[in-house]
Amino acid sequence: MTRRLVWLLLALTLTLAACGTRAPRPAPETPAATKPAPAKPPGYVLKRGGGFYQDDGPGDNPPDNLDAIPNAVPRAEPLHRFANNPYSVLGRDYVPLRAGMPYRASGIASWYGRKFHGQKTSTGETYDMYGMTAAHPTLPIPSYARVTNPANGKSVIVRVNDRGPFLHDRVIDLSYAAAWKLGYIGSGSTYVEVENVLPGQETALAAAPARAAEDPLARVVRTEAPPQTPPLPEISDARGIYLQLGAFSSADNAEALRSRLARQLGNLGERLAVRPGGGMYRLQLGPWADRDEAHRIADQIAELLDFRPVVVQR
């Protein structure tokens, strides 16, 4: 065997040995099978209480120090032209108080955050969840109130520029910032004491603790279910079947309630509409295929809002 052949055989042997010890190439990855999204249950399903606040919260860029946001400073302002008219929501009639009337109440306060941020309030102003504002069913708009959390002794002063809340156990709805300063963001609601504040009174009130409710309505809210009120009358027309949730003499108030309820009712909120007629602005939900479907949806809303809407035909 020639020397050249020996070298060729040696080179071949080394090559085969190297191939035998080389790690095998990994098999190309195949994308994992994606699990199909669960189908949505048929129909509309509403959750009762609490869940509305659990999925609300701060926006993407909250202020660095919410505790440093100053209280609202009471000042003399003209009353809104329409937001202080009597109105009806969820089967109850509301008559806003006259400016300057003393008001003290206690009950449950809730809060509203990013779901309403940037929406219109009853005054037509844009809601700012980081402002010191509040919604109240009957305090004059605009006006000012001191809200105290007796559990921790914290107080805030807010400017009332919106209507609500309309659940039977709530007395006031605070902005996210105000609720943060009172320490109940995580729970969604808490027991508070509310007292209206006139310009120049805020210094004197700061030195005196808020007293328990003297407002008869507040006592009802706190201790027992409100009396049943007769439903709004049916409207006979031939344009469809609806559920009626409120009636206002002000278009702004009707639109503000529509905006609020649209977020509480989820997909159902897309069917809310304000319909003018006879000098009133009615908030209605629909249309529905027939009365059976309308009554089924009314049952779901009754579970959520403690109020059964009236079935009306337009």
Image (cartoon, rainbow, N blue to C red):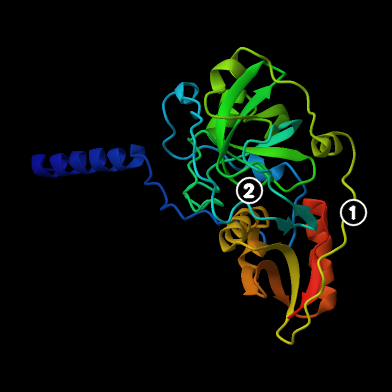
Q: Is residue 2 above or below residue 249?
A: above
Instruction: Categorize mark 2 by other alpha carbons within 10 Å: few (<14), some (14-19), many (20+).
Output: many
User: Residue 180 lies in what quarter of the image?
Assistant: top right
Label 2–label 1 contact, CB within 8 A: no
Q: Which residue is pictured at 62% across the width and 40% down the height?
A: 99
Between the C-alphas of marks 2 and 1, the distance is: 21 Å
- Count of numbered tags: 2
Q: Name the residue that disc number 2 marks.
A: 163
Q: Is residue 68 above or below residue 92?
A: above
In front of the other: 40 or 16? 40
Q: Position of residue 205 (x, y in %)?
A: 61, 18
Give left or right: position of 64 versus 229.
left
The quarter of the rendered structure image containing the N terminus is top left
In front of the other: 56 or 176? 176
What's the mark number on residue 265?
none
Tell me the element at label 2: loop
Q: Position of residue 17 (x, y in %)?
A: 30, 38
Q: Name the residue that disc number 1 marks.
A: 228
Instruction: Inspect this view and state whether residue 120 appears.
Output: yes
**Residue type of the residue flagged with mark 2:** Arg
Q: Is residue 269 above or below residue 177?
A: below
Q: Please tell me which of labels 2 and 1 falls first in the chain.
A: 2
Q: Position of residue 226 (x, y in %)?
A: 87, 46
**Residue type of the residue flagged with mark 1:** Gln
Instruction: Categorize mark 1 by other alpha carbons within 10 Å: few (<14), some (14-19), many (20+).
Output: few
Give left or right: position of 82 versus 245.
left
Instruction: Inspect this view and state whether residue 41 appears.
Output: no
Give left or right: position of 83 versus 303.
left
User: Residue 221 lies in what quarter of the image?
Assistant: top right
Tell me the element at label 1: loop
Q: Which residue is pictured at 57% across the width and 30% down the height?
A: 198
- Residue at the far top: name it: 207
